[in-house]
Image (cartoon, coloured by chain):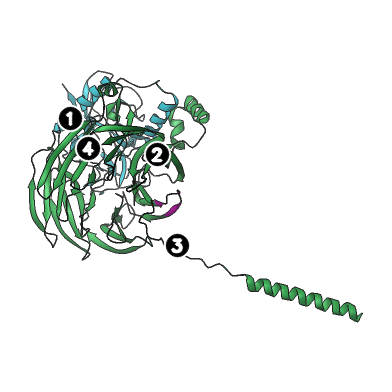
Amino acid sequence: MFKRSLRHLLCGLWLFAGAASALADFVPEQARVEVLGDHREQRWFWIWGSNAPNMVDGRAYLFDDQGRNLGQLSTGIWSNGLQLAHSRDELYATEIYFSRGVRGQRSDVVTVYDARTLSPKREIAIPAKRMTALISTGLSVLSDDERFLLVLNFTPAQSISVVDLENSRFVTEVPIPGCASIYPAGPRDFYAICGNGGFFHLRLDEQGQVALQQRTPPAFDPLQDLLLTTGVRDGDTWYFVSQHNRAYALDMSADGVRPRKQWSLLSDQERADGWGIAGNHGVALHRQSGRLYVLMHKDKPENYQKPGTEVWVFDVATQQRVSRLPLKEQSTAIGVSQGAQPRLYSLDWMVPMPSLFTLWVYLTEGEAGLTPLLRQGVNLYDADSGEHLRSVGDIPLGFLNVVMPW
Amino acid sequence: MTIRWFDEATQLLTRRVARGTSRRGFLGGLGTLLAGAGATTLLPVFRGGAFAQSSAGLQESGDPNSCEYWRHCAIDGFLCGCCGGTSSSCPPGTVRSDITWIGTCRNPTDGKDYVISYNDCCGKSNCGRCVCQRDQGDTPLYRPQSSNDLNWCSGSQADMPYHCSLSVVIGVKE
């Protein structure tokens, strides 16, 4: 009897000791909030767009090179994306809000985000006039030294709001009748592209006030061909493509705008076959190699903004095409990272279903049946070889049309 | 307004699936593009008259809520006919934009070219139905009078929240 009691006692002590040990080993989780590391040299990239049909809820998503979603910014109604600072760990979004969602008091602000916490640091109020458009290149731009942010307005009177980021204040508004997208050309010089093919040259002084404003002679003939506003830059040279499938190199500096060269993206045969430019933001540049990437497709000329199926790569020094890179999906925007072993990013439309299913839906219900199934995704390629690296899917619906390496 | 949209992406997708079955001629597209270019001389001005009653004597056929309907040749947005309005009237509770972009579309019923005013309806969140993007004669933002990439609710009494787009016939090309 005594032995049995002793055995029970020892057993109980053992169980208690074991439980105490287990409790001692258990460390409860603490809910926390992630903080990003340094984004430089990481091959991270952003995607953004209007987020239609939910434009009141503008968004930008951040991904790493493996396709992992690292975070998100919420950027107000009819977002025009982000401006990514290089000299500071900051991001800028020119945002519009209404006090009652889609009505009430409108307020336009430049929101300064911390690049590591993705939290707003401060807001700078600006006139409630910001242009809202679907092609976002040149709607908000940084000066080369990142002291000033310029915002394009459309009421429909066209003007530029100058914002001093260093002193967190709106400085002045400059009318630019007949002109639109803005391109920086130095620490204090900017050019806005105008309807007559010329540019509006704006120079600021150290306080952000107008030091010079004048119009340049036309750099192209808008009655013959129209430059798309999606320019890409290497130093003083901006590269544009046109509705008639030409590439234009324009030097823009404090001294003015100088057309440097232009060339056809197509041979006569390719033009006859119906090849042409494609996508919403279908131009990218790898500065080190001097390679211009242009999104292309075979379609009617009027469909120049429809998704593309190939990326054509041009050497800007020789104006020769050096490769054609076929894409896995229908692409609406491309981007290229800088440095060695660059990535080619493609922001795509797709039906995430087997092809036979897609065909069956099309044959039985037509396009109307497929529309609700369309999704967006990103595909990553080796920008030198065109080799497909990986796909990123399950991106929330919202008509995203920019992919921007960080 | 303008939204690069699903049905257009669908067009391309299905084109890949049913390759070669629906492509029109390059020259035909170029011709319509040039026809649309003729409209660029009009400026983005107040076009309140565009909201008069349907044009008397205009003969047309087809489904106005289909993206392929002839009036929509330069539209980019949600068709108001699918949102409580029609191709020339805004849905209840929205506010029509007074400034617009314009295009020139050929009416297949009478073979004439008409000037179309693509006024937006504003003040509510996106309709989201019957999205339609067609870019005949579309120009970049620096020539706004015929650019469908702009939000034409800007400057309306409801400010810039975009709901849907109209296709109002405001003139005939003689």
Q: Chain of mark 3?
A: A
Frontmost of labels 4 and 1 is: 4
Span shown in magenta: A62-70
B8 up-or-down from A148: above or below: above
The kind of residue tagged 3 is Glu
User: Which residue is label 2 attached to?
Assistant: A348
The cyan-tinted chain is B
Badge 2 marks a residue whose secondary structure is strand
Residues at marks 1 and 2, common chain? no
Reading the chain from its start, which is encountered first: label 2 or label 4?
4
Of A108 and A395, the residue lying toward us? A395
User: Which residue is label 4 attached to?
Assistant: A317
Q: Chain of mark 1?
A: B
The green-tinted chain is A
Reading the chain from its start, which is encountered first: label 2 or label 3?
3
Residue A233 is drawn in which quadrant? top left
Mark 3 in CB contact with mark 4 (< 8 angstroms): no
A346 up-or-down from A80: above or below: above
Image disc number at residue A34: 3
A154 sits left or right of A213 in the view = right
Of A327 and A165, the residue lying toward us? A327
Residues at marks 4 and 1, common chain? no
Residue A173 is drawn in which quadrant? bottom left
